[in-house]
Amino acid sequence: MTTPRKDIHNSDVPVLCQSCEARHKGICGALDAEELVAFAEHTRVVRHAAGDVLMYEKGAIDSYGNVMRGVVKLTKTLKDGRQQIVGLQFAPDFVGRLHAQESPVRVEASSDIELCRISKAALQKLVAGKPALEARLLKQALREVDEAREWMLALGRKTAPEKVAGFLEMMASHSDPSAEESSRPSFELSLTRAEIADFLGLTIGTVSREFSRLKREGAIDITSHRHVTVRDRQSLRRRSG
């Protein structure tokens, strides 16, 4: 692989890294310009279409990725074949379990996505010589644990309206993390109604009714069945409990 080009107007930071919107908040935020060059020598941007499987449950892990764009879903499968969506990942989330030999979940592109991929061997070597990088990965893993606990609370205690509003608020937050509370974020639903119902522990009918209620009461607008615009962010947040 050729050495990444450097922009003469921006020191030693590789051009690809300059254009990456996820860089500062992802694992690369722990690297300085020189370390970014070394890191970029081992990475490549890959694109996957919705439905592509990135890792199989209990499949061997040979590479990792940073989500640059799009949504990734994580699922677990029971012995009888039933599946449960157990998590969603957005930019700049880290895909894969560091130091694990097998993936504990099935990792699938929920929408068209872009990943910054790096081999397992290359990342482990970089982590060994860069404690700040390992600390960033640990911080991200702990954040995912906190989010999982919050979702356990939502599934166990929140009402159907609160679950649906909370799901839409989460999607809105990840669609534009820097947006102000008064903004009206728009996003495409990467999950089908059936997948949303599965994720929230509801029926498809309940999800559809709550979407219609939120639209009727002016909190959101839905066009083309999947495109959502949040019209009243504060109202949506209040409804999420």
Image: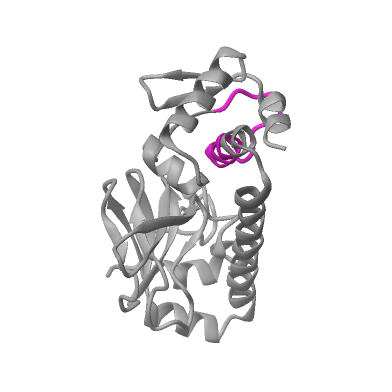
Evaluate whether residue 16 shows in this view.
no
Residue 96 magenta-highlighted: no
Locate residue 4: give its quadrant: bottom left
Evaluate whether residue 104 shows in this view.
yes
Image x and y of residue 115, in percent: 38, 56
237, 199: nearer the viewer: 199
Q: Give left or right: position of 57 versus 182.
A: left
Q: Residue at x 70, y 24 (%)?
A: 235
Image x and y of residue 171, in percent: 54, 39
113, 149: nearer the viewer: 149
Image x and y of residue 136, in percent: 62, 69
Q: Give left or right: position of 230 versus 206.
A: right
Locate residue 57: give its quadrant: bottom left
In the depicted structure, whether residue 51 falls above or below residue 57: above
Q: Residue at x 37, y 79 (%)?
A: 102
In the depicted structure, whether residue 34 falls above or below residue 234: below
In the depicted structure, whether residue 213 falls above or below residue 33: above
Judging from the image, the colouring scheme is one colour
Q: Quadrant of the C terminus?
A: top right
130, 192: nearer the viewer: 192
Q: Count the marks: how many?
A: 0
Image x and y of residue 19, in percent: 46, 47
Residue 178 magenta-highlighted: yes
Residue extent of the magenta highlight:
167-185
